[in-house]
Image (cartoon, helix red, strand yellow):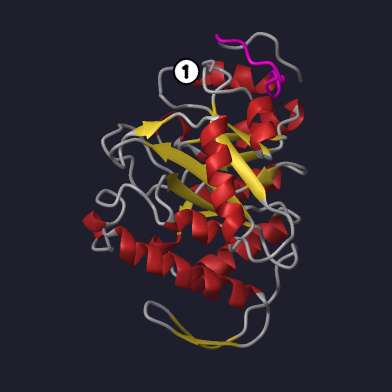
Amino acid sequence: MQYGLYFPNFGMFGDSAVVVEIATTAERAGWDGIFPWDHIQAGHWAGPVIDPWIAMAAAAAATERIRIGPMVTPVPRRRPAKLAREAVTLDHLSGGRLVLGVGIGWPPDVDFGNFGDAADNRTRGEQLDEGLELLAALWSGEVVNHQGTHYTALDARFLPRPVQQPRIPIWVGGLWPHKPPFRRAARWDGVYPLAIGDTPDDFVAMTPDVLTDILAYVTAHRETGGPFDVAVNGSSFHGTESGAPEDFAAAGATWWMENIGWPPDVPLDAWLEFIAAGPPSWSIPSTATSDRQA
C-alpha cells in the first residue's frame, strides 16, 4: 500500500506556495504522493482557487521522490493537444513521477454548463474516451491523424515522448454504482472510485465490500495485463468506521488517498502537523491522530 494526500485546489489550499509546502513536508515524512483536485471554480464554497497544474509543476521542482498528479482532471474541459503537452512537460520536469487522473468532471453546471461546455454526462463521457485515445496517440511520438466527433489532429507529431513508458499512467475516476467509468478504467492503468447514494451529490463512504464489487466488475472488463493501481479515499485524521488501509489493501487497493482539507473544518497548521507525522499506521484508531508512524 502506498499513501497519498488528496486535497482541494481551493479554499485554504488555493495557494501554490501551500501546495509546495504540502509536497515538501510530505516527501520528508514518507508519504508517496500528492493529488490535488482540478476544479475551475469553488462552486458554493468560499475562497480562492488555483490552477492545480501550475501548482503541481512548482511541487515537482521542489521534490525528488513523491508522485504527483491531478485527481482528477476533467478531460472534457481540456484540449487534448494542450493537455498532452502539459502532461509530458510535467512528466519530464518531475523525472517521470506524474500520474494522470482523469474523469468527466463534476459538478456539471458550475465547472461546465456555466461556461458553455457540455453539461450532460453522456457527451462528456464521449469527449473523455476520444480525448484519452488521442492523448495516448500524441504521446507515442509518431505522426497522428485523427478526425473524430469532438477532436481533430492532423499531421501532428509530439516530441519528446514521456519519460514513463509505455505512457504516463492514466487512472480513471468514477462514481459507483454507475458502470461506464469502470469499463473505461479497465482499458487504462488504474481506477479511483468514489461511491454515491441515491443522487450524484450524495457521496457516501467507500467500504472494502463495495471496493471488492467494483474490482470484480473492472477485472471482468480488463482485456490486457500489466500493472493496475487502485486508489481509495479515506480519512485517518478524522477516523473511519468504513475500514482501515489494511482492510482496503486486502480488497485490492494499492493506494490510500488521505482526504485532507475536506470538510474544511481544520486549520492549515493542523494539516501540516498531521502530514509531518507521516502516513497512517496499519491500525487506524476510531478518533484522529494517535498510533502513527513516520
Name the residue at 75% across, 29% down: 30
Quadrant placement of the N terminus: top right
Image quadrant in which you'd find residue 151: bottom left
- Crowd tier of the residue under label 1, counting other residues whose Cα lies within 10 Å: few below 14, some 14–19, many 20 or above: few
210 vs 231, left or right, is left
Which residue is located at x 53 percent, y 45 percent?
214
Q: In terms of secondary structure, where does tag 1 sit?
A: loop
- Percent of width and height locating residue 32: 71, 37
Does 236 appear above or below 2? above
- The span picked out in magenta is 277-287
Q: Position of residue 226 (x, y in %)?
A: 74, 59
Q: Is residue 43 toward the left or the right of residue 262 in the image?
A: left
Residue 185 falls in image quadrant? bottom right
Q: Is residue 24 visible?
A: no
Q: Quadrant of the C terminus?
A: top right
- The answer to whether residue 167 is visible is yes
Q: x%, y% of residue 72?
A: 49, 49
Work out whether 120 lies above or below 7.
below
276 falls in the magenta region? no
Look at mark 1 in the image and give the residue it sits on: 267
Please give the count of numbered marks on the rendered protein: 1
Q: Give the main secondary structure, helix, strand or loop, of the magenta stretch.
A: loop
Q: Nearer the viewer, residue 169 or 204?
A: 204
Q: Residue at left 43%, top 53%?
A: 179
**How far from the left and from the top, in percent, is residue 44?**
26, 35
What's the residue type where badge 1 is placed?
Answer: Pro
